Image (cartoon, rainbow, N blue to C red):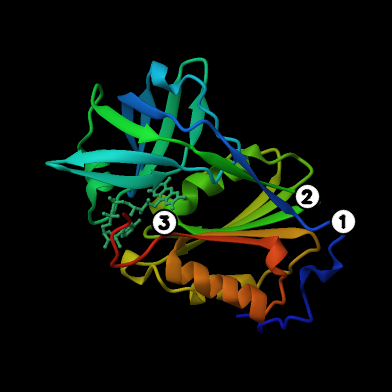
Amino acid sequence: MAEALKAADFNTSESTGEVPVIEKIMHELKFRKLEVAHIQTITPHMIRMVVKGDDLEGFTSLSPDDHVKLFLKKGEETYKRDYTPRYYNADKKELTLDFVVHEGGPATEFALTAKPGDILEMGGPKGSRRISGNIKNWILIGDETALPAIGRRIEELSGDETATSIVLIPDPQDQQIFESKAQHEHYWIHRPVSQSDRFADVTQTLNLIEFMPNTFFWIAGESSMVKGVKAYLRDERGVSKDWIKASGYWKMGEIND
Ligand SMILES: Cc1cc2nc3c(=O)[nH]c(=O)nc-3n(C[C@H](O)[C@H](O)[C@H](O)COP(=O)(O)OP(=O)(O)OC[C@H]3O[C@@H](n4cnc5c(N)ncnc54)[C@H](O)[C@@H]3O)c2cc1C
């Protein structure tokens, strides 16, 4: 294991140009009633679902880390859950969502039991947070819930950018392949889901990576893991907060309502 690099060794202080801007672009908030078109298990812990319908007219998702809100009915209750628009085909009015299969919750249950023709209700995205600026490299860190956003980001990069992804997954077979114009490198960390709040494996991997100037760090996944990685970047590697976007996507032991 490489020795931990200190803040003074590698940071983004040499980055040139203005700091990145996270621009918030609002969209018309629309409630959509869609129909399940196809469902496929793409890896042992990921179900891909394509939903379609005329209600997708005008669907806009400008950033890979946008989300839609699913409204899932179970008995008298309606549960709301956030999911990433993985792909959108405007010609066919088809939206693809990737669902992590975990021990349980209304969204996972829906993905596991849905069949073509079933109805899925959703709202959004109500806005997109577009990250722009003089970014040359992306370091994308997340767990399996962030894979849809990480995959989409890598696929949407231009050939002038590079990306490194560090993704925590339960099983080597959960790895995915992304096509991109950008040069990209993947680190896959296999850990049991019961250890989703651990961040040491990520920081050990980051210790091996030299941070180039103009690198933007995007982190998402289990909240404690995200917090731990962000603190490491700030405190031990001296990364400015302007070059980090960190989001907790779920919290171990807590329902995401
Ligand atoms: C902006 C955003 C985008 C997201 N995009 C996606 C996406 O594209 N695909 C995706 O799968 N998820 C995504 N998530 C995460 C997803 O919303 C949560 O995992 C959600 O809690 C799942 O709902 P559920 O009904 O299955 O479980 P819940 O009813 O919310 O939770 C039930 C139990 O399961 C636990 N739990 C929740 N999620 C997981 C998990 N992944 N692994 C293990 N245990 C878990 C909870 O701690 C709780 O104890 C996103 C979240 C956000 C905020």
Q: Counting residues from the N terminus, which is met first, the one under dot 2 or under dot 1? A: 1
The residue that appears at 48% across and 52% down in the rendered structure is 146
Ligand 1's quadrant:
bottom left
Q: Is residue 200 above or below residue 162?
A: below
Which numbered tag is attached to residue 17?
Answer: 1
Mark 2 vs 1: CB contact within 8 A: yes
The residue carrying pointer 3 sits among few (fewer than 14), some (14 to 19) or many (20 or more) residues within 10 Å by Cα, namely some
**Closer to the observer: label 3 or label 1?**
1
Q: Amino acid at mark 3?
A: Pro
Which numbered tag is attached to residue 54?
Answer: none
Q: Is residue 178 above or below residue 203?
A: above
The residue that appears at 64% across and 38% down in the rendered structure is 156
The residue that appears at 49% across and 37% down in the rendered structure is 125
**Closer to the observer: label 2 or label 3?**
2
Image location of residue 24, percent across then percent down: 63, 45
Q: CA distance from mark 3 to mark 1?
A: 39 Å
Q: Secondary structure at mark 2?
A: loop
Q: Which residue is mark 2?
A: 133
Q: Nearer the viewer, residue 159 or 153?
A: 153
Side of 148 relative to 109 (left or right): right
Side of 129 relative to 169 (left or right): right
* Mark 3 close to ligand 1, CB under 8 Å: no
Q: Which residue is mark 3?
A: 172
Q: Counting residues from the N terminus, which is met first, the one under dot 3 or under dot 1? A: 1
The residue that appears at 66% across and 75% down in the rendered structure is 234
Image location of residue 105, percent across then percent down: 23, 52
Q: Secondary structure at mark 1?
A: loop
Q: Is residue 32 above or below residue 106?
A: above
Q: Amino acid at mark 2?
A: Gly
Q: Amino acid at mark 1?
A: Gly
